[in-house]
Image (tube, rainbow, N blue to C red):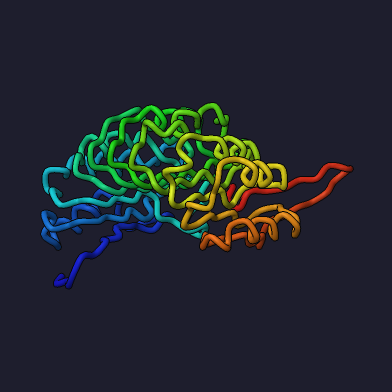
Amino acid sequence: MPTQGPVAWRISVPTYEPPFEWPEAFAKFRAAVDPSTVQAIVVGGWSDPYEDDHSSAHVVEALTAAAGELPALRSLFIGDMTSEDCEISWIVQSDVTALLTAFPRLEHLGVRGGNQLVLNPVRHENLRSLVIETGGLPADVVRAVAASDLPSLTELELWLGTEEYGADSTVDDLAPILAGAKFPRLTRLALSNSDQQDAIAAAVSTAPILPQLRALDLSKGVLLDAGAEALLTGQSLTHLESLDLHHNYLSDGMRERFRAALQPSGVELNLEAEDADEDEYDGTIYRSVAVSE
């Protein structure tokens, strides 16, 4: 399979009635290419990923067992599935800590799905970006990220989700991240897709880490004017290159205040409220995050 330039190899089997299991597909892949040259792997579907006894554990085991064959691997994503393959909240993950210990030169790790996801605190010298996309991120995983020693990390993205789909973290769990000292090189922080977006915005507005950031993403969640007000009246945001607040519940007046405050400094703003659902039932207003089920 001749290629030109760096590529990311996507290895996947159908999630429904596959002709063989993911480890076999991975073995076929390693037989077809020189694994020592592989720099990036995207794990797509595996069989029945929505079943408790069909977690990503066998994927993690196959990858870690082959670590010696993959010395050039720098990027890894686990669970690249659309809703047609498996809803994000249905994806049964597993303990992914071994991926970081088995691949000490890994620079980028992404995971989709928080169901049964486990991560233990770890030290990793070379990881530059960590992305965890979920409709509900377990508090233990948030705490593990906050307790990890990742001196090279420049990008951290956590889709925190909603309690209905397993999110049980609090703003206090984010405190070690927001303190800044844990991740001295972090320049892009995304704490998004949360039904606690106001509280997160308020915490970020006074956080020691804010001045070192170049990109801040508080999008996809239930952000109201109260959280936006805290951002505007907290520490200066004019040093940011980008501020992503899309999928929000802000008033037109608040959006205009953000534009007036930040656009003259060249901050790239995303204030779009597209797909932000707000319903009223029996006098109670219900608002949703962008990605839940």
Give the residue drawn at x 57%, y 39%: 205
Q: Position of residue 6 (x, y in %)?
A: 21, 65
Q: Quadrant of residue 60?
A: top left
Q: Up-down: is 10 above or below 66?
A: below
| Nearer to the camera, 247 or 182 | 182
Q: Up-down: is 167 above or below 267?
A: above
Image quarter hosting the N terminus = bottom left
Give the residue drawn at x 37%, y 44%: 130
Regarding residue 141, the answer to whether it shows in the image is: no
Q: Position of residue 8 (x, y in %)?
A: 27, 61
| Nearer to the camera, 80 or 7 | 7
| Nearer to the camera, 90 or 235 | 235
Relative to 203, 287 lies left or right: right
Give the residue furthest to the front: 264
Q: Position of residue 233 (x, y in %)?
A: 65, 43
Q: Up-down: is 227 above or below 37?
A: above
| Nearer to the camera, 273 or 168 | 273
Give the residue furthest to the right: 282
Q: Position of residue 254 (x, y in %)?
A: 72, 54
Relative to 208, 71 lies left or right: left
Give the residue drawn at x 88%, y 43%: 282
Give the residue drawn at x 62%, y 48%: 221
